[in-house]
Amino acid sequence: MNEDARKIRLIMELRRIGVLDTDVLSAMERIPRERFVPDLFKGQAYENTALPIAHGQTISQPSVVGYMTQQLEIGKRMKVLEIGTGSGYQAAVLSRLCRRVYTIERNRDLLSHAVKLFQELRLNNITTLCADGSGGWPEQAPFERILVTAAALDVPPALLEQLAPDGIMILPVGDTPDNQQLLKCRRTAEGIDYETLWPVRFVPLLGGIENGVENGR
Ligand code: SAM
């Protein structure tokens, strides 16, 4: 099966699990996932599976990317904050749906690899920062949407503070990989509404920053 056929099969699979938003599906169709995975796994880029990237991290499963992106209910004029740039794939998908993506990664090596890809693919509306994302990005806040792609023990208070009125934040929460739920937090006039979505399996949200010297690609 060639790459186009694999891509179509993946898009059909996304639809089957309930990712029906045509803007989300078309963004995922247009972003070349094979560019974001290590050479060894390029043949699996259009399988519905998470894949290893450098530094023991992962590029998320396409169905999870599609589902979380759809749940964000993104509008074209919005500012979106992502925590956990990783390979850069999720940020690239978001960049096709909103005005500007701010993405934070704690590992310098992963971030510089992702920045190179954003430049090569001319994704010019992505701004990056190497930092501990639990503190958010106060200088750029508030954000209409926030997406966290590593699992926190609890909802980081700084991120809630940086969520705009009517804003939505999606994040995995849980203390072990076997016990994580995707949470949808919505800022309303009365406070924050919480909705539990899917059980998920993400790497943990860690503190501090990491320089990254491993050449794992
Ligand atoms: N969104 C990524 C993608 O599309 O490839 C997948 C993210 S991967 C599952 C989680 C990422 O979060 C890792 O790259 C990890 O280094 C990063 N991370 C973990 N804790 C973090 C923190 N406190 N601040 C920023 N990044 C963090």
Image (cartoon, rainbow, N blue to C red):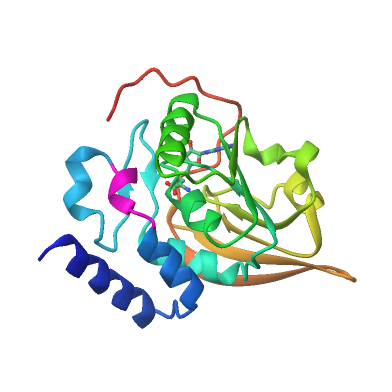
Q: Relative to 87, is 113 above or below?
A: above
Instruction: Look at the image and give the residue range highlighted in magenta.
Output: 31-37
| Residue 84 placement (x, y as % from top left) | 53, 42
* Residue 188 part of the magenta segment: no
Q: Is residue 133 left or right of residue 54?
A: right
Image quadrant containing the C terminus: top left
Q: Relative to 194, is 142 above or below?
A: above
| Residue 171 placement (x, y as % from top left) | 59, 57
In the orientation shown, which residue stands out farthest toward the left?
Answer: 1
The answer to whether residue 153 of the structure is visible from this angle is no
- Residue drawn at the location 35% of the way across and 82% of the way down: 16
Pick the front one: 37 or 58? 37
Pick the front one: 19 or 206? 19
- Residue drawn at the location 54% of the way across and 49% of the way down: 151
In the orientation shown, which residue stands out farthest toward the right?
Answer: 190
Pick the front one: 148 or 11? 11
| Residue 32 placement (x, y as % from top left) | 33, 53
- Residue drawn at the location 36% of the way across and 74% of the way down: 14
Which quadrant holds residue 158?
top right
Please tell me how many numbered marks the rendered image carries: 0
| Residue 131 placement (x, y as % from top left) | 62, 30
Which quadrant holds residue 18?
bottom left
Q: Is residue 38 left or right of residue 71?
A: left
Q: Relative to 29, is 85 above or below?
A: above
Which quadrant holds residue 79?
bottom right
Image quadrant containing the N terminus: bottom left
- Residue drawn at the location 50% of the way across and 46% of the way down: 123
Q: Is residue 56 left or right of residue 206?
A: left
Pick the front one: 169 or 200? 169
The answer to whether residue 187 of the structure is visible from this angle is yes
